[in-house]
Image (cartoon, rainbow, N blue to C red):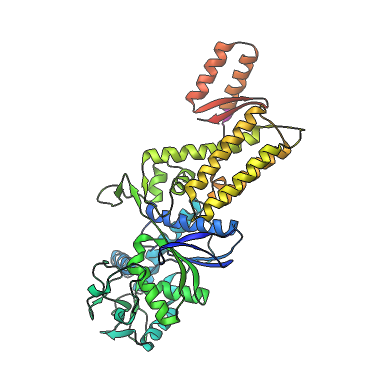
Amino acid sequence: MHIQLFNTLSKQKETVSSREVKIYSCGPTVYNYAHIGNFRSYLFADVLNRTLRLAGYQVQHAMNLTDVDDKTIKGAIALSEKEPGKYADLKQALAAYTEPYTEAFFADLKTLNVCKFDFHPRATDYIPAMLDLVDRLIAQGVAYEQDGSVYYRISEKKDYGKLSRIDLEKNKTGTRYNTDEYDKDDVRDFVLWKAEGKEGVHWHSSHGDGRPGWHLECSAMIHEIFKGAIDIHTGGVDLIFPHHENEIAQSESGYGDGFVKHWVHCEHLLVDNKKMSKSAGNFYTLRDLLAQGRRPEVIRYFLLAAHYSQKVNYTADALHQAEAGVEKFYGLLARLDRLQKIDAAADATLAATAKEAREKFMAELADDLNTPRALAVVLEFIRAANTNIDAKNDQLSSADLEVIRQTLTYFDQVLGLIDLMPKAQVGDDLQQLLAERNAARAAKDFKRADALRDQLLAAGYKILDTKSGSHLEKV
């Protein structure tokens, strides 16, 4: 099975033809906790990785950590001023400032069951590679020094703007940007190596003491890790310009053509149809949502339920829908554990239904990672499986039970829900109430049986009466 992805550069779907795939995903700037919009992009990278592996590709995947840029340096300065004399220099303060957010990022990935990537390069570990790229660009005549900093001259790159479709005629030739981020409507030469005084965060170089520009970091790390061109580069749509546009310029000028085959970008996440912002009071980190009682598996399902290329709207209703989907998935898994296994022949119709569902699931994902349609296939299979079990009065052959379980496990290689499934823990007091209810029912004391049922409902559990016995399930 070959995977097709929409390439931002060509504006069309393209087949990922190489069976050995190298991927680079832009990760967090570790100056604060990542928000849920960030995690949409990270989860997209996770789904891409899982889908490629399920389709038989060999994958090498890197997701970077930006631990030196304007924002992290600002935080390091504030930390050093808060604790004067504690740090030998600002580089030490920078490491102290970014480390807790780095650890939090990895913890958050684990919380959402994002798969482990092969590489997590930190920018500060690759300074020599970055300086090597600066020297290459100067040697190629596309970079120049000015007041201790080094800039990329975009007028030397004739196809600059090909990713973001910017109009270079509006370029202010000879003017420069010394900041890491700027607006698409005001394109200028961008900084590769930023001069810093002895009191700032700096590394020594032949160009003077300074530190790398944000855009330089990813180009150098990609080359250092993969030793050449890569197949797929992912990130949020907000990174198309200037970050990814500048990566292309640097890498193609410094290392040669063929930097990235497929550029794939994830759209924004909105909150109640509004852009997230702290001033609007709708800015949420993953930790904020967990503190509100949101479940990790529901957040993951919610993010899977919209196509990565479309904006997704975070609302209470959308979370309720996601929760319903999760409960259907978990509900069938729990039902399989309660079923009575019987000695019977395998159901050929059920096996055919499962095989068709697996094929449809993979086909939807192969078509530009269409997760909403893949989830629709999953829910249809769950409905069909429950109907089959109902018709057999909760009695299945071992073969049929295994067909259903293996199909759910197949889906989960991409969905990643089973590892997040809460362990069923029903207290002894509730089990005692269930036993008393069953005894009352057997004695035909239906009034008491109903009262005990209502007591269990009030505690948040409903009773499921099956051929294999009575069980409690969380409402």
Residue 396 picture location, percent across and down: 70, 33
Location of the N terminus by quadrant is bottom right
Residue 162 picture location, percent across and down: 35, 71
Q: Is residue 75 left or right of residue 48?
A: left
**Chief secondary structure of the magenta span?**
loop
Based on the picture, tell me whether residue 431 belongs to the magenta stretch: no
Residue at 51% x, 55% y is: 367
Residue 431 picture location, percent across and down: 59, 26
Q: Is residue 23 above or below residue 136?
A: above
Q: Is residue 286 above or below residue 442?
A: below
Q: Is residue 474 left or right of residue 11?
A: right
Outermost residue, front direction?
A: 12
Q: Specify start and end residues of the magenta stretch as a single range.
A: 425-429
Residue 275 picture location, percent across and down: 30, 51
Residue at 44% x, 38% y is: 321
Q: State which quadrant residue 167 falls in.
A: bottom left
Q: Is residue 93 visible?
A: no
Instruction: Out of 366 and 473, give the one closest to the viewer.
Output: 366
Q: Is residue 111 above or below residue 87?
A: above
Q: Is residue 247 left or right of residue 375?
A: left
Instruction: Out of 9 and 331, give the one closest to the viewer.
Output: 9
Q: Is residue 94 visible?
A: yes
Residue at 39% x, 86% y is: 135
Q: Is residue 365 above or below residue 224?
A: above
Q: Is residue 184 left or right of residue 399?
A: left
